[in-house]
Image: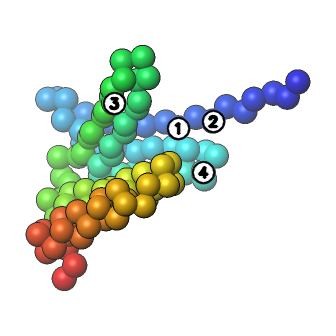
């Protein structure tokens, strides 16, 4: 019988006295990431029993709004790509990508 491999991803959140994130970092040794700093993160976990998504959304208090807009746009684009890989649903993927284009246009991210 083969032995299963375990991989660990660590998230570190440094909070100020009001429990506002000041510093975020993460480690994923299998991916070559070691204590890399980040300004924002979104984590979604599917609870199959409750049939609901559990989320952690964090960003540091010094995250600039213009970077947050880019972060959201890039996250939406990658969610579209992931949706396509998971479902092969071409029509909905195209609709999602159209929204991403609209989002970028309205926020003037393509300039």
- Residue farthest to the right, as pictured: 1
The numbered disc on residue 53 is: 3
Which residue is tagged 4? 31
Residue positioned most to the front? 91
Q: Nearer the viewer, mark 2 or mark 3?
A: 3
Q: Residue at x 26, y 67 (%)?
A: 98
CA gap between label 4 and label 2 equals: 10 Å
Residue at numbered disc 2? 7
**Distance Cα–Cα, label 4 vs label 1:** 9 Å
10 Å crowding of disc 1: few (<14), some (14-19), many (20+): few
Pick the front one: 29 or 106: 106
Say which label, 4 or 2, has the lower sequence index. Answer: 2
| 2 or 3: tag closer to the N-terminus | 2
Q: Secondary structure at mark 4?
A: helix
- Crowding at mark 2 (Cα within 10 Å: few <14, some 14-19, many 20+): few
Q: Is residue 97 above or below residue 62?
A: below
Q: Position of residue 102 (x, y in %)?
A: 18, 68
The crowding category of the residue bearing disc 3, from other C-alpha atoms within 10 Å (few below 14, some 14 to 19, many at least 20), is: few
């Amino acid at each position: 019988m083969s032995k299963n491999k375990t991989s660990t991803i660590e998230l570190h959140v440094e909070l100020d006295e009001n429990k506002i994130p000041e510093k975020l970092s993460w480690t994923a040794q299998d991916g070559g990431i070691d204590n890399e700093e980040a300004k924002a993160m979104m984590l979604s976990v599917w609870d199959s029993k409750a049939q609901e998504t559990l989320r952690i959304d964090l960003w540091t208090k010094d995250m600039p709004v213009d970077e947050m807009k880019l972060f959201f746009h890039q996250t939406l684009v990658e969610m579209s790509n992931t949706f396509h890989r998971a479902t092969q649903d071409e029509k909905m993927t195209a609709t999602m990508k159209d929204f991403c284009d609209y989002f970028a246009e309205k926020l003037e991210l393509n300039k």
